Amino acid sequence: MEDRFGRRINYLRVSVTDRCNLRCLYCMPPEGVTAKPREEILRLEEILRVAQVALQLGITRFRLTGGEPLLRKGVISLIRSLALLPGVEDLAVTTNGTLLARLGRQLLDTGVKRVNVSLDTLNPDKFRRITRGGDFRQVWDGIVEALKLGFQPVKINTVALRDYNGGEWVDFARLTLEYPLHVRFIELMPVGTSWKLAGGSFVPCGEVQSAIEQELGELRPVADLQGGGPAKYYALPGAKGTIGFIHAMSGHFCASCNRLRLTADGKIRPCLHDQHEVDIRSAIRSGAGDEELKALFYQALALKPASCHAAMDASSSGSGRGMCQIGG
Ligand SMILES: Nc1nc2c(ncn2[C@@H]2O[C@H](COP(=O)(O)OP(=O)(O)OP(=O)(O)O)[C@@H](O)[C@H]2O)c(=O)[nH]1
Ligand SMILES: C[S@@+](CC[C@H](N)C(=O)[O-])C[C@H]1O[C@@H](n2cnc3c(N)ncnc32)[C@H](O)[C@@H]1O
Ligand code: SF4
Ligand code: SF4
């Protein structure tokens, strides 16, 4: 599929649940988000149906996200079915890692080869603070298990937050010397309203890169790692892993955007930062055929903006769905 700006769209981010077992302060409000009633959430077979239609349209890469995707009942069997669909070239999961030690083996057996794990601090107390109660050890054990099992690449997503992990960027970078981990620093984005709690901690990736280079020497650019995302990758001399930067705010990458999103409640969302959505759930439930569902994808494609400068302005008030409801 190609959109009206000539961008090739071949990637669908699928949010399989709006629930999460953490409440990261920039993603969720302190009281959590009221989960949608179960009947509003796409059933597993409905997600598969959407994926089958997407494949017919040339979407070949899929990422499961959420909320916390590994919390969704039946997610392993969903992933196994997705992996078996003809034409799927890339299937990956973005997770907070809390269930990875437990489910890693089953996940690998589905055919998924790579995982992205979110981790914003290496300090258990800070981790508890940022995630409002999470256990650092669970996530770290999950990451170690993923490496042991042979997931490749294992990427770490770290939102750069001056007041919360400002002293740790170099420690994260050092991880790539010791482990074949790919640490990506992400700029905080104004999505929903919760990000505002951490808004004052926004740091551009350039500053993180300078801090790392000052301490550990120049970062050399490396070829893109396996993936379909916007990160730019670098490495330290002799490192086993890489360091990536996702300049979502300071140098956005909309001109090469390749993706659509499917929310847990069955809406195709053309852009992370734009409130437009196309309801595919109602169509599926009223018995629409593949051609009608394809038409909804084209409708979403037509709504895809060239970029979202206004919404991505850090001074934006933020509204609409939060990251945990869109899937990042
Ligand atoms: N602005 C913007 N941010 C995005 C987009 N896609 C992913 N991100 C952000 O990038 C961060 C990492 O996303 P991941 O779920 O790990 O996915 P990815 O980086 O696309 O994955 P790879 O395929 O491994 O490259 C998250 O904070 C996302 O919100 C996008 O299209 N636009
Ligand atoms: C919404 S989470 C969903 C998947 C899973 N629960 C996890 O944390 O990996 C996906 C990604 O979005 C990132 N994220 C959430 N809110 C963000 C924000 N306001 N700005 C930048 N990244 C954000 C998280 O750090 C995570 O890496
Ligand atoms: S970033 Fe992921 S783990 Fe943290 S609250 Fe949001 S959905 Fe949950
Ligand atoms: S902000 Fe929207 S257009 Fe830009 S890269 Fe993200 S999803 Fe694509």
Image (cartoon, rainbow, N blue to C red):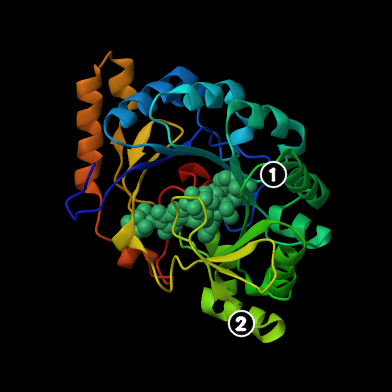
Q: Which dot marks residue 218? A: 2
Q: How far is mark 2 from mark 1, CA to CA?
A: 30 Å
* Left or right side of 200 for 144: right
Q: Residue 266, how many percent across, how many down?
A: 39, 30
Dot 2: element: loop
Question: In this view of the protein, can residue 204 be seen by the observer?
Answer: no
Q: Are marks 2 and 1 in contact (CB under 8 Å)?
A: no
**In front here: 281 or 87?**
87
Q: Residue 192, how many percent across, how many down?
A: 46, 54
Cβ of mark 2 under 8 Å from ligand 1: the answer is: no
Amino acid type, mark 2: Glu
* Left or right side of 67 for 46: left
* Left or right side of 120 for 82: left
Depicted 321 relative to depicted 231: above or below: above
Q: Dot 1: within a 10 Å radius of its alpha carbon, few (fewer than 14), some, or many (20 or more) residues?
A: many
Q: Residue at x 34, y 50 (%)?
A: 258
Q: Residue at x 38, y 70 (%)?
A: 313
Q: Residue 327, how many percent across, how many down?
A: 49, 44
Dot 1: element: loop
Q: Residue at x 68, y 75 (%)?
A: 166
Q: Name the residue at the left extreme.
A: 4
Q: Quadrant of the N terminus?
A: top left
- Between marks 2 and 1 in the image, the one whose residue lies nearer the viewer: 2
Pointer 1 residue: 97
Amino acid type, mark 1: Gly
Cβ of mark 1 under 8 Å from ligand 2: the answer is: yes
Q: Residue 284, how many percent across, how many down?
A: 32, 19
